[in-house]
Structure formats: C-alpha cells, structure tokens
Amino acid sequence: MAIILFKNRTVRPLTGNFAVSEAMRQINPDVVAAYPITPQTEIMQIFSSFVSNGYVDSELITAESEHSALSACVGAAVSGARAMTATAGPGLALMWEILGIASGMRAPMVLQLVNRALSAPINIHCDHSDAMGARDQGWIQVFAEDAQEAYDHLIQSVKVAEKVYLPVMSCMDGFIVSHAIDRVSLLADEEVREFVGEYKYPYSMLSKTVTHGAIAMTDSYFEFKHQQRLAMDEVKKAVEEVSKEYKELLESQGNLKDWEIEKRVLKFVEPYKIEDAEIVLVAMGSAAGTIKYVIDKLREEGKKVGLLKIKIFRPFPYEEVSKYLENAKILGILDRAETFGGKGGPLLSEIITALYLKGIHKPIRNFIYGLGGRDFNINHVKEVINTLERTLKGENTPFLSYINLRKDYLDTLQK
Amino acid sequence: MWELGAVIPYPGNSEEYKTGNWRTFKPVLHTDKCINCMICFMVCPDSCIIVENGKMIGFDYDHCKGCGLCAYECPKDAIEMIKERG
C-alpha cells in the first residue's frame, strides 16, 4: 500500500512539474510508462523517486522511446490498469501513431503534456504546436494556465477519461508553468484517492478472454470512427459530472474562496471580465494570466477589455464560445501554434466555426505569438489590444500578425 | 458486434472473419493427380486445406485468400489456380 504523505490539505511552493508529480502520487496509478524529454523530464524524475521510496504502488516502465511508452500504457489500460504517462513536443510527435490507437481502442488514460515547440530548428521552449498536431487524434485536450490548474486538471482528467473511455491529454506550458514555482494548494492524499476511486474497465484482458486491436476493414472501421464521435459528444456531460463532484470536494472543508473553487474545477471555458467587454481576446494556457493582468490595468483606465480562456480544446466548446463572444465588438484570437498555409492559427478556425454556427459575423484579428518560447509579456498584450482598438476606429490592420518578431529580422524583409 | 474500441468480447473469433472474397485466383483440386502428400497442408498460411481420414479433400473457400502457394508447391500439379469470376 502506498504511503500517505499529506494527511491534510496543504499549500506548497511548487513548480508545475512538481505539482503534477504530486497529483500523480496522490492518484497512485497502476502503471506509468514514460521516456524523458525536456521540459517533462522532471515529472518522471520526481515520480520515479516516489516509486523508489514506496510512496506509490505504481509499476514504472522506463521505455526505450515515447512510441513504446504510450504503447505500454495502451496495453496496461486495456488490461484493466490505470495508466499514465507524460511527454513534451517531439516526444508527443513520436507518440503520434499510438495516440490514434489509444483513442481508437477506447483506452482511458491520462497523458501529461508539457507543451514544447516542434523541431526544426530544434527548440525546447513552449508553444502549442505539439498539442495542435495531435488535436485530431481523438483525445480530450485540456489546457492549464498555471501549476494549480495543471494539478487540478490532472486529477479530474482521470475521472473524465474513465467515464467516456477516451484518453485525456492534460497540457501545461513548458518552462513558463512547468519550471516556474507557484503557490499550489494540494488536497489530502486520501481525498484524491477516494475521488478517483477504482478503475473498472469492462473488457479487461485480465478478467476475461477478449480480443483487443482486431482488424476492421471497409465493412466496419467506419462505424467505430462514428462511435468515437459519439463518445466525444458525451464528454460535456462527463466533465459536468466530474467537476460537480470536484467542486463538492473542494467545498467540503469550507476554507477556500469561491473564485478559487471556480478556477480549480474543470470547465470548457473561463470568461474574464467579459460581460460588458467590447474588445475580447481568446487565448489558452499561461498567456491567459498575463492577459488578465493587462485587462485589470486597462479596466482602471476605463477600457472595456475582456478575455475568454479556452480550457478544453477537444472537444471544442462551440456553444459556450459563441455565447460569450456574441456581444464583443471585435475579437483578437491568440494562437501559440501555426497552421502554415491556413488563414490563421488552429484556435482561429475553431472560433470562426463557433461564430458561423450562430450566424455571428464580426471583426476578428489573429495573432500568432510565443512560438518556440518567444516572450509574450504585458507590452505584447497591450500591442494586441492597441491593434484591435485601431481596427475598431476604422484603421486598416492585417488579419494575421506575428507578435514580437525581432526588428533586425523585420529589417531584412524591407530590403 | 459494435463493442467499444472494436473489442471482440470472446475468444476464438478469427475464424468468423471471412477472407475468401480477397481472392483473385481460386485453387481447384484434381483428385486424380493428388497423392495426398500433404505438402499443401503444410504450406498453406491460412489452414485452408481440408483433410479427412488422411486424405486431402478440398479447400476452405471462406478463408482461402488465393495466394497460390499450394499450387506452386504441389509436386504432382494436382492444384490448378483459376481466375475468380465477377
């Protein structure tokens, strides 16, 4: 039996990676298979010390690649074990084939993704290219703004995955969240273990003789893909159930503030000062925190600016998004990933779809920021808002712009 | 049939998957030439040679994919591959 470290709730200064490792320790998964890759390495390093010290009962498989690590997780999940893994950027790229196998075999598991740019040029810093490259592989994708959210999302993801039999990719920004120390409020070990409960898989290979991974040709493959679409439609209900339960758990000790509870429960979107906002930004991940700070400052100056933070990207919350964006005069969509050859980033396409479905047509600008960890600070948020203000006043502004490109590079374009 | 994730919830199910319609050429046995040496039985990758009382009596056309190994290996040319119609 795993050792109990935290008998009570506690608040600790933790990096995102450490917070996630603590969540994994408290969840006490049956199987963890992983391969080290920056900036995720620290998670497995910390978790392996938990295994060595007997803090968890998990079987830790140190695989020879990410492809093998996720394969081991698929095998474990369909054997009836609760499986988890963690990776980043190129590691997720190597897992790509198995991502579709995990979702296609309806193997519930949780993958902690520490968002990192894809090569080339080789780069270890944050952007969302890795997750966006995997967005159509049938996984639920959740994005955290800070270490606290990463911790809470991971715990709730386990339950969501097991309710709908789909794998969940819980994402946090590499370095910005994973390596920065944050104030993280942890639940007691037993609270988490009780919350996640026991994993029960109906087709466990250990309990009956079943065939997993059978061939399905032209006669039946199509139907199984349709089943996956239906499963994604079920996610909304599952998230609502799990977050309701988590909310009750957070409320049970009565010492957390309402806003704190609201922020920690799993949701599709988080609106910030959006009710009367004329300019609304849409973003995911750590940038949301920077944007909120700027919004607070601009609100003091009387500027009506708001933010819609997307927490769950797959399945995409089209209805909620169009509801929150309905009244804005102009939208600024912030993408931390590129869709080369597309009209803009992946988030832009989803937002436009959401608006189209409600027959809403309004000015919209797309901003690509932070690729390969390029800084996105308060001045850049102000620059974005300034562009949107000028657009509202009738000035011609480009539909898509890159934020914080180097001047010496821009000069070369002028020649 | 439509279990989650294409799971087949009972064992011994591969026989139910009929692969006979993959065939372009079909093996036909000429019993007058066959000496029941069982080389075809040994080389068939899909166990489609039907044997009764020590004698080769024909093919399992539900599963034979028409690879033609049996015809190629037959020392007496007792198996002929003929084109499937339609």
Image: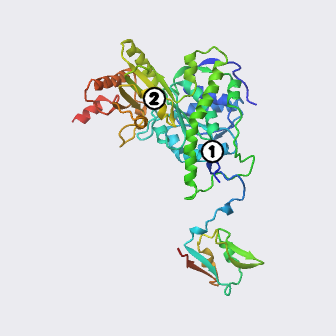
Q: Residues within 10 Å of mark 1 (few under 14, many from 20)?
A: many
Q: Position of residue A5 (x, y in %)?
A: 70, 23
Label 2: few (<14), some or many (≥20) within 10 Å?
A: few
Q: Name the residue furthest front.
A: A359
Q: Check disc 2 and report the residue beneath it.
A: A323
Question: Looking at the image, which residue is at 68% across and 22% down?
Answer: A188
Indicate the secondary structure of the residue bearing disc 2.
Answer: helix
Quadrant assignment for the C terminus of chain A? top left
Extreme-left residue of the structure = A415
Residue B64 placement, left or right of A287? right
Residue type indicated by callout 2: Lys
Front of the two marks 1 and 2: 2
The foreground one among A373 and A223 is A223
**Residue beneath the point at 38% across and 25% down:** A328
Residue A330 located left or right of residue A310: left
Q: Count the marks.
A: 2
Residue that carries the numbered disc 1 in the rendered image: A74
| Position in image of residue A41 (x %, y %) | 56, 33
Query: Disc 1 on helix, strand or loop?
Result: helix
Tell me the colour scheme of the image.
rainbow
